[in-house]
Amino acid sequence: MTDVWLDANVVLRYLTREPPALAAAARRLIARAADGEIRLRLTHVTIAEIVWVLGCFYERRPVEIADALRGFVLADGVSIDDTDTVVDALRLMSDANVDFADAYVAVAARRAGAAVASFDADFRRLGVELLDIKG
């Protein structure tokens, strides 16, 4: 099976259905993946870009973004490295109303049994150990 790496703009056209011609092209590509013709690959960096655009430009709420992306990354023919971490980060982003990047770091740190170094107080409510770096 041929791997095809997706850019954020393809996923954004698919999710927003805008503009119609590009959204239709994105749907056709995703249908090819669902049919097993190709495998669409995404990185967590691309997911972060999609989250940012949907939140900032399209003014979607974290819960809407998380629901749409969770369905997309779990769809037939779509592959993402460390799917479980991405899906859990999307859930945490929605539940705790935090940035995807912070949620991803929190989930990755918890899975590794590691602390997080940050000045961001949001991490206190994300269930991770914070390393005291203020001295």
Image (cartoon, grey):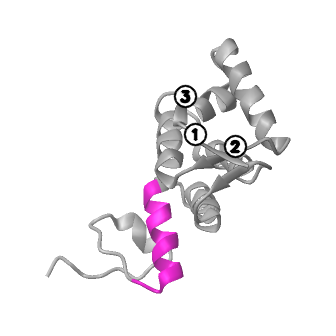
Answer few, some or many: residues within 10 Å of disc 2's Cα (few below 14, many 20 plus, some between 14 and 19).
Answer: some
Mark nearer the viewer, 1 or 2: 1
What is the number of the mark on residue 68? 2
5 relative to 29, above or below: below
Viewer-nearest of discs 3 and 1: 1
Name the kind of residue labelled 1 in the image: Leu
Is label 3 in a helix, a strand or a loop?
loop
Count numbered badges in the picture. 3
Q: Position of residue 72 (x, y in %)?
A: 71, 45
Give the structural element (helix, strand or loop) at label 2.
helix
Q: Is residue 31 magenta?
A: no
In the picture of the structure, the residue carrying the numbered disc 1 is: 6
Residue 65 location, x and y as percent? 62, 43
Whichever of callouts 2 and 3 sits on the residue coming sooner in the sequence is 3
Q: Is residue 31 above or below residue 95?
A: above
How far apart in space, not on screen, are marks 2 and 3 (Cα)? 13 Å
Q: Are marks 1 and 2 in contact (CB under 8 Å)?
A: no
The C terminus lies in quadrant: bottom left
119 to 35, vertically: above or below: below
Residue that badge 3 annotates: 58
Please state the extent of the stretch shown in magenta in the rendering.
101-114
Which residue, as the protein is rendered here, is positioned at the far right?
Answer: 35
Q: Quadrant of residue 64?
A: top right
